[in-house]
Image: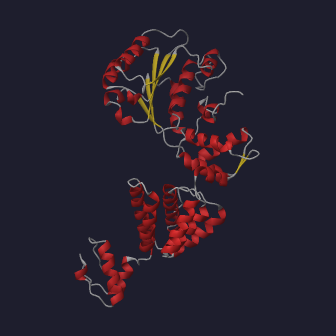
Amino acid sequence: MGVYVPLATKYRPRKFSDVVGQDMTIRIITRGMQKNRLGSALLFSGTRGVGKTTIARILAKAFRCENHAANDPEPCCKCESCLNFSRDNQIDVIEIDAASNTSVDDVREIIESSRYRPTSGEFKIFIIDEVHMLSKSAFNALLKTLEEPPPHVKFLFATTETYKIPETIMSRVLKFDLKKIDADLIAQYLSSICNQENIAVDAEALALIAKAGDGSIRDSLSILDQAINISENGKLSSSDIRDMLNISDDGDIIDLLDLIFAADVKPAVEKYRDILKNNASSAEIINALVDYVHTLTCLKTDVVPLEVIVSEDLLPRLKKMSEKISLAALSRIWQMLLKGIEELRFCERSDIVLEMLLVRVVYASKLPDLQELINGAGVNKSPVENKENVNIKDERSGSLVSEALNMFPNAKIER
């Protein structure tokens, strides 16, 4: 049995044109190479899996490519230098993990090595990953070399935590902030890989993987790696992905929202417990509710949602729900769900925490809007700070106004 190569390694970009979702960074780098205007030290920052180290390696390959043309910044991937990259056999490209080489002595070795010209090619290149892990004394030792670098040396840094790097270092590097990859781009990229791997997969499954990857190509590919292992006859469905990631079905979450909006506590709690029985986690359920409340708010206000991962047959149902629920109620539910996410972090019984939250949300969803209460209660025209200033016209509306003011004690009510 041969050694298995993970998808993230197998399909790692080898040229600038292969990089997904970092168009502006690639544009600046390639134009800079064409004009010979790239400095001796470059820093790539961003969250995990967005291409920091990958771009640094491609840039190092391009700097040392033997067939490099002035008008074409792409490495040829055919010369001896480029082939040595694929074999991990580049003597003049030193890649260091700062997490395990943090001391000033490690940096002194880099400085000492930088004094000598490369054995071949124009540049000796140092790629330092997680550079923020270097100690303060190590940064200080590196400072002079960055300020007056030898002409044959290039430093390429990568970090997930820019704020930990001293300002003296930041002022001497060309900084690139890599953004999270758009979910649609990730889904398209995964689709192309599935085609090469002869895996039939539906669009919803790819969208679910892309969303779970949270803007990271590497994380998305790792999830796809797992999913391929459970595929049947080279086919992968959205239900497979939901089972693997413990994601509840869209219809179940929308059913739960329907019951919340209907202000029916018992059926809502029972539906929630049914979803839990299908191996969905409380955190996943509340995040799904947050997503759909956002989507409903966008539909209510005719704003295009940032992303909607729901089958086409459920979209009309969401639109009908948005027509029945008020914007004020959606706003209240949104705030309570966000508060609930915080509460889940501080209690071991997350299932009970979310159940109690649902009871509060159901109760809040049936409260009338504050303006409706004011209109029905005949509140004085002057602003009021507390419930003693409210004129009550009937028992029911007066009670509701008092209830609302208890929830919002600092509210100013005008008519």
Residue at the bottom extreme of this rendering:
394
- Tell me what residue is drawn at x 29 percent, y 88 percent: 392
In-image side of 78 versus 390 (left or right): right
- Tell me what residue is drawn at x 54 percent, y 43 percent: 181
Q: Is residue 231 above or below residue 15?
A: below
Q: Is residue 158 visible?
A: yes
In the rendering, at what x and y percent does residue 146 appear?
A: 37, 20
Q: Is residue 159 above or below residue 325?
A: above
In the rendering, at what x and y percent does residue 4 appear?
A: 66, 30
Q: Is residue 113 above or below residue 74?
A: above
In the rendering, at what x and y percent does residue 130 appear?
A: 43, 30
Q: Is residue 164 above or below residue 126?
A: below
- Tell me what residue is drawn at x 53 percent, y 22 percent: 60
Q: How is the image coloured?
A: secondary structure
In-image side of 182 versus 141 (left or right): right
Quadrant of res 198: top right
Q: Is residue 189 visible?
A: no
Quarter placement of the N terminus: top right
Quadrant of res 316: bottom right
